[in-house]
Amino acid sequence: MLEQAWCRVVEHDSEDIEPPAAQVEEVVTEEPDVLPPAPDLLVQPEPEAVQPQAMTFQNPPRPRRHHLFIALLVFIVVAISGAAGWQYATSQGSRLIATEQETGVYSNIRIYEISEANRLAMNKEDFYSKIKDSLYAINQQLKPQSVQMTVYYQSINQTLNYTFALKSRCDSKQLVMAIYHWRIDPTQLNNLILRETRRKISEMETCS
C-alpha cells in the first residue's frame, strides 16, 4: 500500500467524464469443417461399355486318342503290306507241284516227284533209277494183299524227303522220312526204303 503523502484525489465533473467507449467485440465465426461427402452421395462415373469379344476355347490335347489313331494306322499299313506281299509271293514266287513219274510201270505203286514249278528240265533229279529194283520187289508183295502204295519224294540239296502211304479196304498206313546224303550209297538207300516199307506192310490189318 502507498503512503498518504503520495496519494491525491482528483475530482472531475461528471460531464467531463466520457463514458467508456463501447467495446465492439469481434465475433469470429469459425467456419465449420467441410467434411467429404458420403460415398453414397458421390457421383460415380458411368462405366464405359465394354465391347464383347469373341473368345475361342481350344480343346485340350488328347494324346491317348492320338496315339491309338497312330497305332491303328500303322496296323492297317502293315496288314495291307503283308497282304500285298503274300499275293506277290503266291503269284510270282516258286510254287510246288507234284509230277507223276513212270506212269503205268507198277500195278500197285504210283510215284510223284515234288518240285518247283519253274524248275528247269535239266535239273530233274534221277531218283527212280536208284530205287527201281526195290520198288519192283515191293510191288510184288502188294499185289496179293490188294494194297495200293503212293510215293512222294523231293530232293533239297543233300536231303531226300521221302513219304509213302499204304491203303487197303480196311486199313491205311503212312511214313515220312528225311534221308541225308542219300546219293553217297545207293545200296544203303535201297535197303532203308525196302526195310521200312515192308515193316509198314506187316502192320496192315488183313482184310477178311
Image: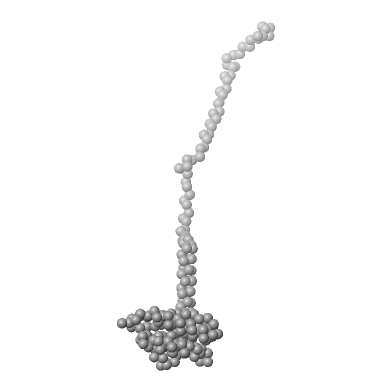
Residue at 41% in and 80% down: 200
Can residue 176 be seen here? The reply is yes
Q: Position of residue 26 (x, y in %)?
A: 55, 28
**Which is more toward the observer, 103 or 208?**
208
Quarter of the image for residue 16 reads: top right
**Which is more toward the observer, 182 or 153?**
182
Query: Is the C terminus in the top left, top right, bottom left or bottom right quadrant?
Result: bottom left
124 displayed left or right of 140 = right
Location of residue 195 with respect to 49 vertically, above or below: below
Q: Position of residue 155 (x, y in %)?
A: 50, 84
Rendered image coloring scheme: one colour
**Which is more toward the observer, 76 or 44?**
76
Can residue 88 be seen here? The reply is no
Query: Is the N terminus in the top left, top right, bottom left or bottom right quadrant?
Result: top right
Residue at 47% in and 58% down: 51
* Residue positioned most to the top: 4
Location of residue 176 with respect to 120 vertically, above or below: above
* Residue positioned most to the right: 5
* Residue positioned most to the bottom: 104
Quarter of the image for residue 143 reads: bottom left
**Which is more toward the observer, 38 or 105?**
105
Location of residue 108 with respect to 71 vertically, above or below: below
Residue at 48% in and 54% down: 48
147 displayed left or right of 34 = left
Image label count? 0
Q: Position of residue 61 (x, y in %)?
A: 48, 62
Q: Position of residue 140 (x, y in %)?
A: 40, 89
Residue at 57% in and 20% down: 20
